[in-house]
Image (cartoon, grey):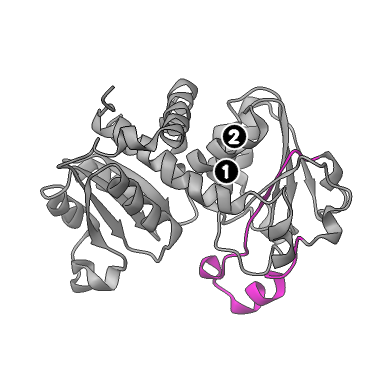
């Protein structure tokens, strides 16, 4: 595994191996404490991030490695006009592996063509977010005990949400997945995703505009925020930002074992009162992100824990 740019870069077998390794790390953390001793991870974040950047850094530290990098393009030489390709080429001289986030779609792919170190796409615009996908898959598997035969509802910004796009791609390769899309017309999944995933693979999905009409059939509800940074028009953002708010009342008809996921950050789309519901999994999901990134770093560096 030289680079990870798109969740489809991984086979189902490779995904399952990563999830198995993450499970093993969770069960026996001490065994993995020094796996990356002497290794360095560079976090190149040209776009703001809290969970993804810090979880990568925590993952490397808990493996015994070191971290360098930047959390804003303003603090890098890109502010002076340096190209992404040059930045990555230089940083790959200093680090064994690179996690990169960029607001422009395709930037991590370009970086992978220039880098001498493995590149992990930590999010590129509205395109892909493969490590969040691995986080989501690990959470679903740990909560449901499987990645097959589930009904999953995606709610909110399905047009610009890269976490949604990546997870749909990954789940489309598992058996008996029933997709339910919950969004206003303006934020429906993009046409390329319909053609590339649903039409090409002959998969069906349901498109609705309210949570209430489908909540009782869902095994997993994947909430997303309406992303201000993806809008060109402030008025459109303000009009749509509070379209879907999940509260305790909406959960009255939901399954007792529903799993509620959210890639975070949350704004208004999940009421704070839902945090105390045992079906809320989004903070466990954030923790799972650290473990799955630990597993990914190990696999991409070809490292194994000692016995």
Is disc 1 surrounded by few (<14), some (14 to 19) or many (20+) residues within 10 Å? few
Circle 2 sits on which residue? Answer: 142
Residue 147 vertical placement versus 227 (above, below): above
Q: CA distance from mark 2 to mark 1?
A: 31 Å
Residue plotted at (56% across, 48% down): 284
Residue 24 placement: quadrant: top left
- In percent of width and height, residue 232 lies at 54, 72
Q: How many marks?
A: 2
| 269 lies left or right of 263 | right
The image quarter containing residue 83 is: bottom left
Q: Is residue 264 left or right of residue 205?
A: left
Name the residue located 36 percent from the left edge and 40 percent from the top edge.
294
Determine if the magenta segment contains residue 257: no
Helix, strand or loop at mark 1: helix
| Residue 244, percent from left and from top | 75, 63
The residue depicted at 44 percent of the width and 34 percent of the height is 22
Is residue 129 visible to the viewer in this orientation of the structure? no
Q: Nearer the viewer, residue 128 or 139?
A: 139
The answer to whether residue 173 is above or below residue 30 is: above
**Disc 2 + disc 1, Cβ < 8 Å:** no
Residue at figure coordinates x 59%, y 78% from the top left: 234
Segment tinted magenta in the rendering? 218-246
Q: Quadrant of residue 186?
A: bottom right
The residue where tag 1 is placed is 192
Q: How dense is the environment of label 2, judged by Cα within 10 Å: few (below 14), some, or many (20 and up)?
A: some
Q: Nearer the viewer, mark 2 or mark 1?
A: 2
Q: Where does residue 251 sit, x and y in percent of width and height?
A: 83, 53
Please report whichever mark, 2 or 1, sits nearer to the chain's N-terminal start.
Answer: 2
- The reply, left or right, for residue 24 in relation to residue 136 is left
């Amino acid at each position: 595994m030289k680079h990870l740019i798109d969740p489809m870069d991984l086979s189902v077998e490779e995904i399952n191996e990563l999830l198995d390794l993450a499970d093993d790390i969770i069960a026996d953390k001490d065994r993995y404490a020094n796996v990356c001793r002497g290794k360095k991870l560079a976090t190149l974040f040209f776009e703001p991030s809290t969970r993804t950047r810090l979880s990568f850094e925590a993952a490397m530290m808990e493996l015994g490695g070191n971290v360098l990098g930047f959390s804003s393009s303003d603090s890098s030489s890109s502010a002076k006009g340096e190209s992404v390709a040059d930045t990555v080429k230089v940083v790959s001289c200093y680090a064994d592996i690179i996690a990169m986030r960029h607001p422009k779609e395709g930037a991590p792919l370009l970086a992978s063509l220039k880098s001498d170190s493995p590149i992990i796409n930590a999010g590129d615009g509205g395109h892909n977010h493969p490590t969040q996908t691995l986080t989501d898959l690990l959470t679903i598997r740990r909560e449901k005990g499987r990645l097959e035969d589930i009904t999953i509802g995606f709610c909110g910004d399905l047009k610009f949400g890269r976490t949604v796009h990546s997870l749909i791609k990954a789940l489309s390769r598992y058996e008996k997945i029933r997709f339910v899309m919950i969004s206003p017309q303006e934020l429906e999944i993009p046409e390329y995703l319909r053609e590339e995933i649903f039409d090409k693979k002959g998969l069906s999905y349901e498109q609705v505009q309210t949570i209430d009409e489908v909540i009782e059939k869902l095994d997993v509800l994947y909430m997303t925020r309406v992303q201000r940074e993806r809008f060109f028009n402030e008025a459109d953002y303000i009009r749509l930002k509070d379209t879907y708010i999940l509260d305790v009342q909406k959960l009255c008809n939901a399954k007792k074992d529903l799993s509620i996921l959210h890639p975070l950050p949350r704004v208004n789309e999940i009421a704070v009162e839902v945090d105390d519901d045992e079906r809320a999994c989004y903070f466990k999901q954030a923790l799972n992100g650290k473990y799955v990134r630990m597993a990914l770093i190990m696999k991409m560096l070809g490292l194994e824990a000692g016995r």
